[in-house]
């Protein structure tokens, strides 16, 4: 079974620029998550999709972050404009169903550096 | 109070010893609990999950859950240098997985 695919692996941008990340979940996984992991901290949930609908985006900074999952498969996360504090690893994860007791499978992440 | 709390460490143990990693959580309604291992620069990988009170063993790993005390732990027996990583405790809360900050484990030869 192919894992969760993410791209790019690394991105360096200047503050106030925009950036987009892409994620393709495990085939058949209806639930997709974007997490932000700042160095030295645990992952923080930004947004959760069930198929192509948003289930939870309560911690997404909506003034600058947006995400979509138009066809219920792959997803993009965008930041515009970026701030220095957005420097982090952005992790995409998927699960067969929400609340799966088997947990989530994570992609390799995108490391964003804002300078 | 944070939803999921862990001591950030580092926890240093000699090779062959038992490493004990602890986690507390605030929501009594939480149903399932996970331990993820994260090597430096890598993404988290699931190593154990538990949802019933008591112990669950898988090879060198044992997860322990005490819902009354809102406490979950991970024991690693016969620790190896390859076990050196950050261990993240995660708790399911209304279909969201909430992570602690992780405990860094160092196993020295």
Image (spheres, helix red, strand yellow):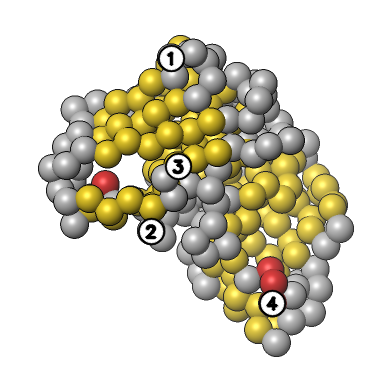
Q: What distance separates the C-alpha of mark 1 from that of mark 3? A: 18 Å
Report which residue position mark 3 lands on. A7
Q: Is residue A14 above or below residue A75?
A: below
* Residue B90, x across and y down, in percent: 58, 43
Q: What distance separates the C-alpha of mark 3 from that of mark 4? A: 31 Å
Horizontal placement of B3 versus A102: left or right?
left
Mark 2 near mark 1, Cβ–Cβ under 8 Å? no
Q: Dot 4 falls on which chain?
A: B
Mark 3 near mark 4, Cβ–Cβ under 8 Å? no
* Number of residues whose C-alpha sits closer than 10 Å to that of mark 3, classed few (under 14), some (14–19) or many (20 or more): some
What element does badge 3 sit on? strand
* Number of residues whose C-alpha sits closer than 10 Å to that of mark 4, classed few (under 14), some (14–19) or many (20 or more): some
Report which residue position mark 2 lands on. A39
Horizontal placement of A40 versus B34: left or right?
left
Q: Quadrant of residue B108?
A: bottom right
Say if residue A107 shows up in the picture: yes
Q: Residue furthest front?
A: A8
Q: What distance separates the C-alpha of mark 3 from that of mark 2? A: 19 Å
User: Looking at the image, which is closer to me, A114 or B53?
Assistant: A114
Q: What distance separates the C-alpha of mark 4 from that of mark 2? A: 23 Å
Q: Residue furthest bottom?
A: B109
* Residue B51, x across and y down, in percent: 73, 35
Mark 1 near mark 4, Cβ–Cβ under 8 Å? no
- Residue at 44%, 50% (x, y): give it: A9
Report which residue position mark 4 lands on. B81
Circle nearer the N terminus (1, 3): 3
* Number of residues whose C-alpha sits closer than 10 Å to that of mark 1, classed few (under 14), some (14–19) or many (20 or more): few
Tag of residue A70? 1
């Amino acid at each position: 079974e192919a894992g969760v695919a993410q791209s790019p692996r690394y991105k360096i941008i200047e503050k106030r620029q925009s950036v987009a990340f892409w994620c393709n979940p495990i085939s058949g996984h209806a639930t997709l998550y974007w997490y932000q992991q700042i160095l030295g901290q645990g992952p923080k949930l930004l947004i959760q999709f069930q198929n192509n609908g948003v289930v939870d985006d309560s911690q997404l900074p909506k003034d600058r972050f947006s995400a979509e999952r138009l066809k219920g498969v792959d997803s993009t996360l965008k930041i515009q404009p970026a701030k220095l504090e957005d420097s982090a690893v952005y992790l995409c994860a998927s699960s067969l169903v929400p609340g799966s007791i088997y947990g989530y499978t994570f992609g390799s992440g995108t490391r964003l550096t804002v300078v | 109070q944070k939803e999921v709390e862990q001591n950030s460490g580092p926890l240093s143990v000699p090779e062959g010893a038992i490493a004990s990693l602890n986690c507390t959580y605030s929501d009594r309604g939480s149903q399932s609990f996970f331990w993820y291992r994260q090597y430096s620069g890598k993404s988290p990988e699931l190593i154990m999950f538990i949802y019933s009170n008591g112990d669950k063993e898988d090879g060198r790993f044992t997860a322990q859950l005490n819902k009354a005390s809102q406490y979950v732990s991970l024991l690693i027996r016969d620790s190896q240098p390859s076990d050196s990583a950050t261990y993240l405790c995660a708790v399911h809360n209304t279909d969201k997985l909430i992570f602690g900050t992780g405990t860094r484990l160092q196993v020295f030869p």
